[in-house]
Image (spheres, coloured by chain):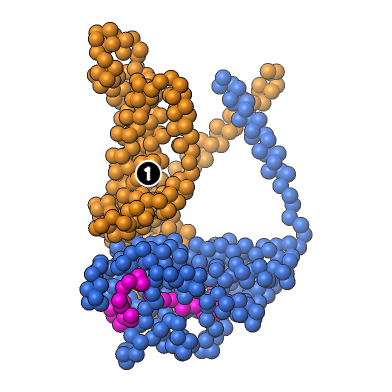
């Protein structure tokens, strides 16, 4: 490589780094500014001239709706979401928060044992030839567009679930959770494989030399020393599931009623943003409330992903 | 290794910027008419745009759905030339338009009828308005009174949908049941009601034109006890059936040029007969064009 092209490459990649980091920081700033502003800033207002554009019978009911403002308590724990109700707008996102948690946690309840099991098999038991086939295949699965999984939810899972007695039709939290599990499975498996592989080989050899079989070695030696990495795999998978939009939008039926029944339709935080944001007007109470919902979603996924990264770092340090 | 990766990224960036620089310039005189909004109206406007483009090949028409509210928000933000809206403009929209300095001008381009539909195995024929309201708002939770042993499942649309707004305005005192589902279009509502014994949905009659297997249209019982039907031409033309709504196009200020020409084509006999062939109604005489 000549010095000139070297310098050029350095300059360009430097620009690329500054651009991408700058964009992300900018996005974060806008989200924080808007979200915090929606919660604690001055409420949206209406000038006398704007009010004059309305018919008298529209004015009274409309003013209360426009001046309304989501409070943090209502946002987190309120069960009623009707942000454009002309008389008494309500900004309770508690039901959506519950739905986001319900679908994502159920998905991880399915994906964690499957992913860990597959990882254990791949690391400890799989014949080398088969392993070299299965690993890239799992990684390819991670690239399936989530809208394709949404279509699977509509075409395959929906009819199966709606045939169950006691169900309310196939668009439900369970349907979304199944597809989220499928989406997160490659991530969970790949990261668990990494964690199990990071266990020092001499520890495993020592265990085998002491007469333990492979299964005992996996349970008593590999898993305990890889525990932080496996926890990281599940946590990062959870982070993906919490933030996923298309699957839950297509599979869950989007009903607002708060529920813990997996067979009921639910509407997640992400689905609400996707369904409502582009129909709102700048400065209206509804849009402000959606910024607050976006902030809530960000804090949730950021915390979970941060926890995952910290667990991962601990695993790397341990090995 | 890292060095090589960076070089690769750098080369990619150079290539990308070259490609962007080479994007073809738009030919002089060709412009795009952007229409966004009601998914109901989009069924017709898509076809209308094809016919119109044959007469005005220098203008291309881009039609997008998303729901009536999405169309109005985009018009106020200056992102589209026309908002297709299947309900009257809301007070909030008037205020927002005024704030942005946009005058919303409405043009009636069609007439649509919304029907309540149930599963074909549901014995109910017609509902009183207050019973329909009870079922849709969650006050009535099963169909026992009408001889069906099944819970009520309401299949609705997102709040951005004009159909959602029209049914709420005409039938409900408050909001829909919180357990009502928000589906993305008429055909999804029809599919869901077909598969669910206790299903109840609201859709455009034009969508039922495409597929109405396994679902049945309900009549609404008026105050004098007469059953009003969405498919009875007289009940619709006289506006006695409560769910008859205008299909509007909103423009920012008086429509002119290509925008005015397109609206005129929509209202012309050719545009209206296309609408009729797709299951929309003739514009009632009681409605002013503006």
Q: Which secondary structure lies at badge 1?
A: helix
Chain (blue): B
Of residues A69 and A100, the one drawn nearer to the viewer in this rendering: A100
| Magenta stretch bounds | B104-133
Q: Position of residue B191 (x, y in %)?
A: 41, 64
Decide whether the magenta segment is chiefly helix, strand or loop. Answer: strand
Chain (orange): A
**Quadrant the C terminus of chain A occupies:** top left
Q: Is A111 placed left or right of B73 in the picture?
A: left
For the question of whether residue A268 can be seen, the reply is no
Q: Position of residue A178 (x, y in %)?
A: 35, 45
Mark 1: few/some/many CA within 10 Å (<14, 14-19, 20+): many
Residue A127, quarter of the rendered image:
top left
Residue at the image position 57 percent from the left and 83 percent from the top: B289
Residue B115, quarter of the rendered image:
bottom left
Q: Residue furthest bottom?
A: B224
Residue at the image position 38 percent from the left and 36 percent from the top: A185
**Quadrant the N terminus of chain A occupies:** top right
Residue B166, quarter of the rendered image:
bottom left
What's the chain of the residue with tag 1?
Answer: A
Provide the residue designation for mark 1: A180
Q: Residue furthest right?
A: B28
For the question of whether residue A147 can be seen, the reply is yes
Residue B130 inside the magenta-drawn segment? yes
Residue B193 inside the magenta-drawn segment? no
Q: Vertical placement of A278 versus B87: above or below?
A: above
Q: Position of residue A301 (x, y in %)?
A: 36, 41
């Amino acid at each position: 490589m000549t010095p000139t092209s070297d310098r050029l490459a350095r300059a360009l990649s430097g620009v690329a780094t500054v651009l991408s980091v700058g964009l992300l920081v900018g996005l974060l700033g806008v989200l924080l500014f808007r979200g915090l502003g929606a919660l604690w800033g001055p409420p949206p207002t209406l000038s006398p001239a704007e009010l004059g554009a309305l018919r008298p019978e529209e004015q009274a009911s409309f003013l209360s709706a426009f001046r309304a403002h989501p409070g943090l308590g209502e946002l987190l724990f309120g069960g009623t979401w009707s942000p454009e109700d002309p008389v008494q707008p309500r900004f309770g996102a508690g039901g959506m928060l519950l739905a986001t948690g319900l679908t994502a946690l159920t998905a991880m309840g399915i994906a964690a044992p499957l992913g860990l099991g597959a990882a254990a098999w791949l690391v400890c038991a799989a014949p080398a030839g088969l392993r070299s086939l299965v690993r890239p295949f799992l990684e390819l699965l991670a690239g399936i567009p989530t809208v394709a999984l949404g279509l699977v939810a509509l075409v395959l899972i929906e009819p199966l679930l709606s045939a169950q007695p006691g169900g309310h039709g196939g668009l439900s939290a369970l349907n979304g959770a199944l597809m989220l599990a499928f989406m997160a499975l490659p991530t969970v498996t790949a990261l668990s494989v990494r964690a199990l592989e990071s266990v020092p080989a001499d520890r495993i050899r020592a265990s085998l030399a002491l007469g333990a079989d492979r299964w005992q070695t996996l349970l008593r030696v590999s898993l305990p020393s890889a525990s932080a990495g496996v926890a990281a795999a599940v946590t990062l998978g959870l982070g993906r599931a919490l933030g996923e939009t298309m699957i839950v939008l297509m599979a869950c039926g989007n009903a607002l009623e708060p529920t813990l029944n997996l067979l009921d339709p639910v509407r997640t935080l992400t689905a609400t943003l996707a369904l409502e944001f582009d129909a709102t007007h700048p400065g209206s109470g509804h849009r402000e409330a959606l910024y607050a919902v976006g902030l809530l979603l960000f804090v949730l996924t950021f915390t979970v992903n941060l926890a995952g990264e910290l667990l991962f770092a601990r695993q790397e340090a341990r090995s | 290794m890292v060095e090589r990766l960076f070089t690769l990224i750098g080369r990619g960036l150079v290539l990308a910027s070259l490609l962007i620089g080479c994007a073809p310039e738009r030919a002089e005189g060709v412009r795009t008419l952007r229409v966004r909004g009601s998914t109901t109206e989009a069924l017709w406007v898509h076809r209308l745009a094809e016919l119109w483009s044959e007469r005005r090949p220098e203008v291309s028409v881009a039609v997008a759905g998303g729901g009536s509210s999405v169309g109005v928000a985009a018009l106020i933000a200056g992102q589209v030339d026309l908002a297709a809206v299947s309900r009257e403009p809301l007070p909030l929209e008037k205020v927002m338009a005024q704030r942005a300095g946009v005058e919303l001008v409405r043009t009636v381009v069609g007439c649509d009828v919304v029907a309540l539909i149930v599963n074909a195995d549901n014995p109910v024929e017609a509902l009183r308005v207050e019973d329909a309201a009870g079922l849709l708002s969650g006050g009535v939770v099963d169909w026992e009174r009408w001889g069906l042993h099944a819970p009520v499942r309401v299949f609705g649309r997102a709040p951005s949908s004009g159909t959602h707004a029209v049914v709420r305005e005409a039938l409900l005192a408050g909001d829909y049941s919180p357990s009502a589902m928000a589906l993305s279009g008429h055909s999804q509502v029809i599919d869901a009601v077909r598969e669910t014994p206790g299903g109840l949905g609201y859709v455009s009659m034009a969508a039922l034109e495409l597929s109405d297997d396994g679902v049945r249209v309900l009549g609404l019982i008026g105050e004098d006890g007469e059953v009003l039907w969405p498919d009875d031409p007289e009940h619709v033309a006289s506006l006695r059936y409560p769910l008859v709504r205008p299909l509007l196009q909103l423009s920012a200020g008086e429509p002119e040029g290509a925008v005015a020409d397109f609206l005129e084509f929509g209202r012309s006999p050719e545009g209206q007969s296309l609408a009729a062939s797709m299951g929309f109604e003739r514009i009632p005489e009681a409605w002013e064009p503006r």
